[in-house]
Image (spheres, coloured by chain):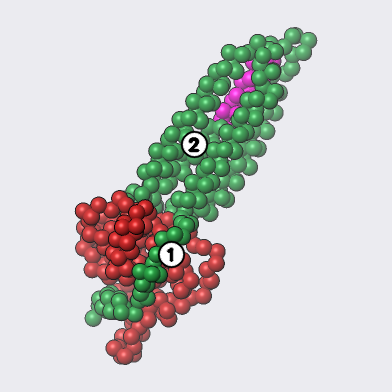
Amino acid sequence: MSKDLEQQFVTQFEAHQNIVHKICRMYTNNRDQHNDLFQEVTVQLWRAYPKFRGDAKFSTWMYRVALNTAITLYRKSKRQVTTQDFEGVSFKISAEEYDDTTERQLKLMYAAVKELNDIDKALVLLYLEDKDYREISQTLGISEVNARVKMNRIKGKLKKVLNP
Amino acid sequence: MDGLELLKKDWQQQEKELPHLSAKEIYPLLLKKSSSIVKWIFLISVIEFLFWTGVSIFFEYTDQNESFSSYGLEGWNLFLSVVYYGGILFFMVWFYLNYKRIKATDSAAVLMKNILKTRKTVRYYVWFNILFLSLGLIISSILITFQLPESEQIDITRMVIILTIVLVLVVGILLLFYRLIYGFLVRRLNKNYKELKRIED
């Protein structure tokens, strides 16, 4: 692939890399796994890039490829360790901004999200990223109505975490 | 504030805490090899194609040709060859077309469906081989038996029963092997695909 294309990709990727980091955080439990998934997503994005026509936004295209990698293509590598540092590295809560109750609630919410299956996590992630149901449905390949119904069910489930 | 809204606020504030790779750090990542499930499915599928083609060619070119000629069954042999090589060609083209359809830029549901479809092509190829070898062996044995002089006639029923038992055992072992290997490889993919289908039902 040409140097120009490579440079163009790296520039766009660098600017939007937060998307990949956030998806890695949602689907992994520690730094090793995070880096491994980040690597795989980068390779998949780079492979798909020559066919990126620019008719969609780069970020929209990136969410799709990155999520597809996380929930479908990615095979966990053997070198990963099983240490759970979900509340530490993965989701660092800025404690100074919250009182104890808020912090406790956030920890409970993050832990509950962590327990969701891969598809529900994808829905939650896109919801947290403020994506509309049209984009959520197109990314996952389900109808808009069903995406909304499913998200409402997840919301209900998560609501119970704080008010059992 | 609602729990999920609280989470959303915190999630969106995390941006500044996320790691940031410079362009210099990104370039080497592009050179790394993928270890995606598609790559593994492709590699295993190619091995399966080679293995089963090898097994069938082995049967085709060892004693079979000689036996068929000596019993005057060259026509039957030609028929088997045409069906078999036609089958290989058909499955290889089908596999290639399905494989080419796998794109990380599709929606999750379409991507999963295409991967599973590609995987299924190879499974059908394996079944084609097993059926071809089994039926070929049974029918050929019956045809050969009919060509034998009366003094050398053997009990066809007994022969078919023995062959069937052997084949059932071989197929059973293969099924177990498949369940283990592919059950492990596509377990997560299957689970996620079923979940998406469930949302749509």
Taking B141 as reference, is B186 above or below it? below
- Circle 1 residues within 10 Å: few <14, some 14–19, many ≥20: few
Q: Quadrant of the N terminus of chain B?
A: bottom left
| Pointers 1 and 2 within a single chain | yes
- Circle 2 residues within 10 Å: few <14, some 14–19, many ≥20: few
Q: According to the colouring, which chain is green? A: B
In the image, residue B136 lies in the stretch drawn in magenta? yes
Q: In the displayed structure, does residue A34 sit left or right of residue B74? A: left
Q: Which mark is residue B28?
A: 1
Q: Amino acid at mark 2?
A: Tyr
Residue at the far top: name it.
B150
The residue shown at (47%, 51%) is B39
Taking B163 as reference, is B49 above or below it? below
Q: Amino acid at mark 1?
A: Pro
Residue B45 placed where, x, y %? 52, 43
Mark closer to the chain start, 1 or 2: 1
The residue shown at (51%, 35%) is B125
